[in-house]
Image (cartoon, rainbow, N blue to C red):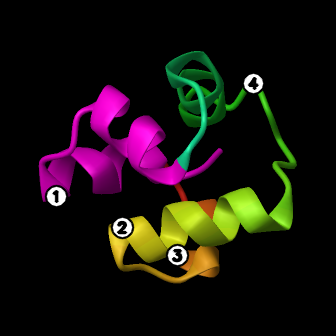
Amino acid sequence: MNNIRKIRKEIGYSLTELAESIGISVGYMSHLERGGRKNPAYHIMKKIALKLNKSIEEIFDDNEEQ
C-alpha cells in the first residue's frame, strides 16, 4: 500500500487536483491510491512526492502500516 490518499487529504488536495497538477488521469491516480498499481513509473512517483512535499519513501513505503 501507499500513503497517497492520507497525505493528499492532510494537505487538502482533491483527487482531481492532484492528478491534474502532475499530468495523469484521475482514474490512474485513483488506481494508485487504492493500491491497484503496485509499481508506478519512477517519474510518476517523483511527481507525486514533489507535489505532496514528501519523499518517495514516505509515500510509497510498503513496510509502513496503513
The three-letter amino acid code for the residue at tag 1 is Ile
Report x, y in % for residue 55: 53, 83
Mark 1 → mark 4, Cα distance in angstroms: 23 Å
Local secondary structure at mark 2: helix
Quarter holding residue 1: top right
Quarter holding residue 57: bottom right
Tag 3 residue: 58
Tag 4 residue: 36
| Mark toward the start of the polypeptide (2 vs 3) | 2
Q: Which residues are magenta?
A: 1-22
Tag 1 residue: 11
Q: Residue at x 83, y 41 (%)?
A: 38
Determine whether label 4 and label 3 are within 8 Å by CB.
no
Q: Closer to the camera: disc 1 or disc 4?
A: 1
Determine whether label 4 and label 2 are within 8 Å by CB.
no
Mark 4 → mark 3, Cα distance in angstroms: 19 Å
Q: Closer to the camera: disc 2 or disc 3?
A: 2
Report x, y in % for residue 15: 34, 30
| Mark toward the start of the polypeptide (1 vs 4) | 1
65 vs 61, nearest the viewer: 61
52 vs 22, nearest the viewer: 22
The three-letter amino acid code for the residue at tag 4 is Gly
Local secondary structure at mark 3: helix
Q: Is residue 64 above or below residue 17?
A: below
Determine whether label 2 and label 3 are within 8 Å by CB.
no
Q: What is the number of the mark on residue 52?
A: 2
Determine whether label 2 and label 1 are within 8 Å by CB.
yes
The three-letter amino acid code for the residue at tag 3 is Glu
Q: Residue at x 34, y 28 (%)?
A: 16
Crowding at label 3, few (<14), some or many (≥20) Cα neighbours within 10 Å? some
Mark 4 → mark 2, Cα distance in angstroms: 20 Å
